[in-house]
Amino acid sequence: MTIATKVNTSKKDLDTIKVPELPSVAALKAAIPEHCFVKDPLISISYLVKDYLLLAGLYFAVPYIEHYLGWIGLLGWYWAMGIVGSALFCVGHDCGHGSFSDYEWLNDLCGHLAHAPILAPFWPWQKSHRQHHQYTSHLEKDKGHPWVTEEDYNNRTAIEKYFAVIPISGWLRWNPIYTIVGLPDGSHFWPWSRLFETTEDRVKCVVSGVACAICAYIAFALSGYSVYTFVKYYYIPLLFQGLILVIITYLQHQNENIEVYEPEEWGFVRGQTQTIDRHWGFGLDNIMHNITNGHVAHHFFFTKIPHYHLLEATPAIQKALEPLKNTQYGYKREVNYNWFFKYLHYNVTLDYLTHKAKGVLQYRTGVEASKKAH
Ligand SMILES: [Zn+2]
Ligand SMILES: [Zn+2]
């Protein structure tokens, strides 16, 4: 109660930020070469096949890896499975956005083929993910990101406050916490969760859930009905895939300088400009279909540009945002070979959002740093 009063009083004194003129989506689109908007189903399918083959290769190699390199080799294999599993996820991600092809039936089919084997329920995830894109950096409507304000933080229990700080949490945040338990957006597997509003949503939830269950059953049968084998060679790799996905998503929308907006300050372009391209290096960006270093382009044109054109569209967007270079709304890119440690570090330092100006929030560390600089 005291905290809420304190925040409300200080809110009254906040300045309004003067926003420079931002380009329209149409102006950005006009700046991008036209062929970037062409979806070629055969190229898209070839990436799906490529990722299956890579995963098959990893399964073929694992007995040798374990034989010659022991548990250290197995640990490396888990990371590789996490990366390639996330690549497969990204193919399904294009299906979910309709940027895989112009045929909805093909997108839905390939989306399930890509996502069900990694136990991601395609249609429910498609729904929550769309809200992330439509309302990026919106304090209340940006799904997938539990934006934590000072008030939320102070009302949290110790375990809620520090859960993200515990490194092991990264392995559990996607599966089971986000998709199964449903924190914060509602369960993606339970048809009557708060994520769904219509009967169609609920039927789709059941169909996608059954597709995952069939894949899990096949994996269990291939494991010789051994729980130990199933967990070691199927479920643990999936936890690594979940970790990689959490890191990707987290790093693309978080640093000490990004802004999050209350409804009256939020705008589509303004919100999207808070997205960050991150170059992971070691060939990983390429393997994961440039979800990491082409995310800004993806955010502006999520239904229109397939992953294999993101890198061509990026310099055009960078150029179009050039006049905003020295403002909060310029193109953002970082080279992060230390992506894993960066993620762990941010989990400790980016604890909660606080008001920077009227209707505009930033992480506490960013607000404090800019106060010191002035
Ligand atoms: Zn995003
Ligand atoms: Zn997306």
Image (cartoon, rainbow, N blue to C red):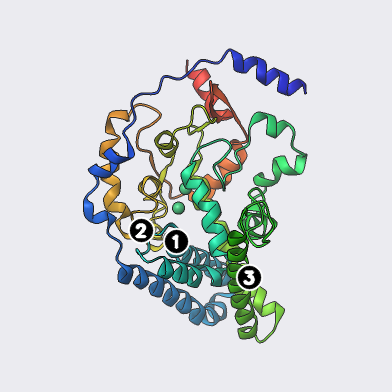
Q: Nearer the viewer, mark 3 or mark 1?
A: 1
Q: Residues within 10 Å of mark 1 (few under 14, many from 20)?
A: many
Mark 3 in CB contact with mark 1 (< 8 angstroms): no
333 lies left or right of 349: left
Q: As displayed, is residue 239 above or below residue 51?
A: above
Q: As displayed, is residue 373 above or below residue 134?
A: above
Q: Which mark is residue 235?
A: 3
Name which residue lies at 74% across and 37% down: 156
What amino acid does circle 3 point to?
Answer: Tyr
- In the rendering, at what x and y percent does residue 121 appear? 57, 64
Q: Quadrant of residue 172?
A: bottom right
Residue 258 visible? The answer is yes
Mark 2 in CB contact with mark 1 (< 8 angstroms): yes
Q: Which mark is residue 283?
A: none
- In the rendering, at what x and y percent does residue 147 appear? 60, 38
- In the rendering, at what x and y percent does residue 103 appear? 37, 66
Residue placed under numbered mark 2 in the picture: 307
- SS at badge 3: helix
Q: Residues within 10 Å of mark 2 (few under 14, many from 20)?
A: many
Residue placed under numbered mark 1 in the picture: 90
Give me the C-alpha separation between circle 2 and circle 1: 8 Å
- SS at badge 1: helix
